[in-house]
Image (spheres, grey):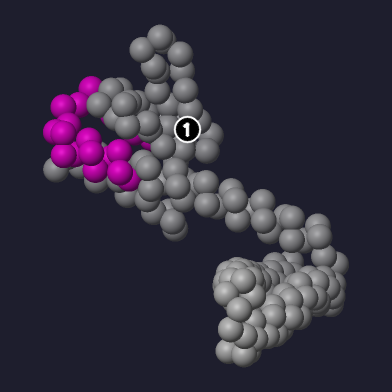
Amino acid sequence: MKTHLWLWLGLSVSLSAEAATYRWMDEYGQVHYGDTVPPQQVRKEHKELDKQGRVLRETGQSSLTADELRRIEDAHRRSELLRQHEQEQQRRDKSLLLSYANEEEIDLLRDRALELEMLQINSLKLRREAMLERVLYANTELSKRASKSASRELQQLREDGQTDLQRIDELLSQRQAQLEALKAKYAADKQRFRELKAAEK
């Protein structure tokens, strides 16, 4: 494999190496600069520049194989995904520092959010108890009565109650999952806030 290919791949995906700047010209004669060379430009002439804009290396027209080009495209995609991830992390970090002055504020907001979620959970539990009593009542009465009309009404009451119980159980499961997700979120926010504050010192 050509030397310049290995160099390009290394610069594209390395997290520790200093990012290079590349200069190339598109098919319309427009000059572009970037941290990586677009896959469609790899086969064409481009230059690597230092921080002062001086040319470190020139790559002329090449004849890369399809496999080599595919590797470069994959490396470019990984590099772009990494860049997007880093930008998103920077945005979250900035938002975190702007939202809280200290860890106590994170705990306070967490407790409020968990309290609201618990109110929803307790409300559902009360609804479940009431619905369960209705189903049990229907079952008890069905075992006592012989009237067909009364039995049909009670059977409908029991079926409706069982359907409602199933729905309430699903909602309870969702709320419990939301409660655990909130705990995990605020724990992660608190840990990241602590790391960012430590880095400022």
**Residue for point 67% across, 51% down:** 91
Q: Give the left or right position of residue 96, taking residue 104 as reference.
A: left
Q: Point out residue 108 in the picture as x, y percentages from the top left corner.
A: 84, 75
Look at the picture and state if 1 lies above or below 176: above
Residues 92 and 184: in front is 184
Residues 95 and 25: in front is 95
Image quadrant where residue 45 sits: top left
Q: Which residues make up the magenta segment?
A: 56-75
Look at the picture and state if 130 lies above or below 48: below
Is 135 colored magenta in this rendering? no
User: Which residue carries the number 1 mark?
Assistant: 34
Residues 107 and 4: in front is 107
**Residue for point 31% across, 26% down:** 40
Residue furthest to the top = 28
Q: Give the left or right position of residue 19, taking residue 92 as reference.
A: left
Image quadrant where residue 125 sits: bottom right
Image quadrant where residue 187 sits: bottom right
